[in-house]
Image (cartoon, coloured by chain):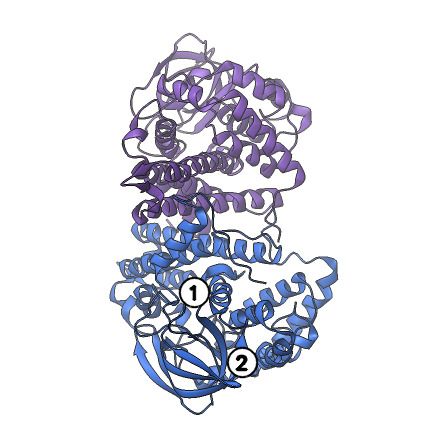
Chain colours: A blue, B purple
Amino acid sequence: MDFNVSADPPHVMDFRKEVAAWMAEEFKGHEHLRWSASWSTREDQDEYKFRRGLAEKLGAKGWLFPLYLKKYGGAELTVDHQMVLETELFKYGLNLSHVFYTLARIVAPVLIRWGTEEQKTEFLPPITRAQICVWQVLTEPHGGSDIANCQTKAIRDGDHYVVNGQKVMVGHHLPPDYLWTLVCTNPQGKRHENLAWLHIPANLPGVTIQHMNLMMGIKNAVFFDNVRVPAKYLIGGENNGWKVASTHMELEHGGDGRIAADPLIERVIEYCRNTHIDGKPIMEDLRVRDLIADMTIELNTLRRFNQLIYWRRFAKKPHPYGGPQQRYYQRMLRLRNGERLQAIMGADALEQNLSVHEVVDFEYAVRTGPGQLHGGGTLDTDRLIFARRLGLGRPTIEKAPETD
Amino acid sequence: MDLSLTETQEEFKKVAEDFVKAEVPAHQMTQWYKNKQTFRPELVKKAAEIGWLGMMLPEQYGGAGVSAMDCAVVFEALGHGPVPGPLFTSGVLSAQMIFEACAEEQRKALLPKICDGSSIVVPAITDKAAYWGPEAVETRLAKTPAGYIMNGVKRFVFDAEAATSFLCAARTEEGKVVFLLVDAKSAGVSIKPHIGFFVSVAEVRFNQVAVTPADFLGSSGASWSTLEAALEKSLPILSAYQVGATQEVFDITCEYTRTRVVFGQPIGRFQRVQDHCVDISINLDMARWATYEAIWRIDSGIDARAGAHEAKATASDGYYHGTNYAHMVWAGPGTDYSHPMMAHSVLAHTLYQYLGTPGQHKRLMMDALYPRAS
């Protein structure tokens, strides 16, 4: 076994030098944006502009999706090259999945799996080159985890689908270019067989977006009022939406993997070294050290789960329950760490600190513990999928859907 | 990055799995644990013949010179049994301790016998159960004109019954902790099994036992930091054994959810039962990947101190909590001492304590990562 994510085989050694030099140049003057590792829910225009620009530059080189064919916006490189890009980006706290706030990392593989050749050629390059921002819009006001119970209707009318309905708790504070969504094409049809997947341009007449102020930050309600969507935006064919959804959700539910670590612990250590009680840093306090030990082990575990899934995905060794296991673990870990932060630093853990990025802000970590228990399905659905993939109480074990 | 086993490791694993199936069938294993007859000389002999004792040692000392990962896949498979006996205590921990502490002459005299199974060296480190560290070493060495006299009571010595000699920690008159070998048949050595919710442990009493400077490891008895170096390489192997045992608990429990029918359906259809299996799986895989990462560090020559403590903490926690969650699924039938669950349950509690609890290892992990000023 080799856990080293930077052990370069000879054919990428020069590539690492090239990427490192390129990144150093691009980050000049923007070093303060380090650790912007996930979607930001803060309205920081400077950060957004920088990250969007960086993504476009990476995309222009085919580096956001280095494995893809050039005609799809990739660079036709190897997994080893992709690892170089991931690890060099991570030096600045970023990863290929979240250079800027779009869902390309999930949308592109689903398009590769389910799109026609024409759709891949037309839709993929703007996504993989980061020229557009795509939101996933799945949750409905009455649907929750049961997304197959989809009430947003898309009725075929000649060369168009006429879409009516509402999705909620989606996106972020900046507008999207496309809406990636599940719709119901036949309200009387059989469950799971009456659905379709659409890639809807967000500027079509009849689309309205309203902010929602939620525990996790700004999200949105999207209304579709007689929106006429050209049929070329149907992904995966008529009534095949549930299969497309399965691929999408496998990637969303932990199946995509990562090779980066959560940076939170670094700031916790810094805080504990700089905070003195009775003349001694609280880092010396055994009670505090015990809490940090548990945080460390659990964050290490999450890093290893992510790394394992990443490796399995690209080594083409699919695993039935790695995704839901990671997902469930991550959510419970965030919740536990939220409590540990409060136990370590008292009310300091509840005060927002806008001078650091939110992924290392204690208040954000505490608030999103309970706040992120449900996005993309509750943690109970995680365990339900997990149980099916373990074949509990069943004669057969459900396989993970194909991703890419 | 490559998280797969090598072909050789797959072969090692297969040999050990076949051994468990042939030599340690569940019905027999259950009886051994139930009747506290866990020292099986025939198993030690066979393990020695296959080459599992001291397998990480260089070949000139009787070992196979294999990597820590090669050794770990064997111990993980043995954990499925769980195969009892001193394969870890003598063949890994004592072997590593002697290798770390001794010069060529002592290594040549002691290690080949560990590897061929003719001597079984069992560590007897702490006297007090409530702490893991040099502070818990209370056995005394008093200097005499002829050598030393040793007095003390080592409690909870794992695999004590199997020992031909003990690798003891003792305190000199100057207060220094040293390590020495004491023949189990020496005058004044007595062994009394502990009775309770654990297995394979005994109290070893040293009453006016005469020892000579030649019994000391190395020229001066080495030190606690020598033991730490040996533990860095050994703890992840014990962790791998615990991972294998937890995997076995997980496997038999998942299978039980398919076959046990109540209220007209297999119990695995009940979400609360499913949740218990999910919790076992998480405990299991936390331990598994912490263990593998620590072992990879050892084999790569990277500092593995924090990783070894993390592995021991997560593997002991994982086996313990995994077994408790499994009890929630098995309910009444799993509490019968004739059921494999009870062998695992008793062993999980024993190994939770053995060589320090998870809480103690987490503190040691923290000290390795962020040393304390005081």
Which one is nearer the viewer's eye here, B200 or B128?
A: B200
Give the quadrant of residue B53. Answer: top right
The mark tally for this picture is 2
Q: Would you say the residues marked 2 and 1 are in contact, meaning their CB atoms lie under 8 Å apart?
A: no
Residue A390 sits above or below residue A152 on the image: above
* Disc on res. A192: 1
Question: Which subunit holds the residue at mark 2?
Answer: A
Which one is nearer the viewer's eye here, B81 or B56?
A: B81
Residue A78 sits above or below residue A180 on the image: above
First-in-chain label (2 vs 1): 1
**Left of B299 or right of it: where is B277?**
left
Rendered residue at 42%/35% (across/down): B252
- What residue sits right under mark 2 in the picture? A233
Residue A101 sits above or below residue B11 on the image: below
Residue A238 pos. (x, y %): 51, 73
Residue A153 pos. (x, y %): 40, 78
- At mark 1, the secondary structure is loop
- At mark 2, the secondary structure is helix
Which one is nearer the viewer's eye here, B366 or B175?
A: B366
Q: Residue furthest top?
A: B187
Residue A14 pos. (x, y %): 73, 66
Q: Is residue A91 visible?
A: no
Give the quadrant of residue B345. Answer: top left
Quarter of the C terminus of chain A within the rendering: bottom right
Q: Is residue B249 visible?
A: yes
Question: Which subunit holds the residue at mark 1?
Answer: A
* CA separation in Å, label 2 and label 1: 20 Å
Residue A69 pos. (x, y %): 69, 71
* Residue type, mark 1 in image: His
Which one is nearer the viewer's eye here, A41 or B222?
A: A41
* Residue type, mark 2 in image: Tyr
Mark 2 surroundings: few (<14), some (14-19) or many (≥20) residues within 10 A: some
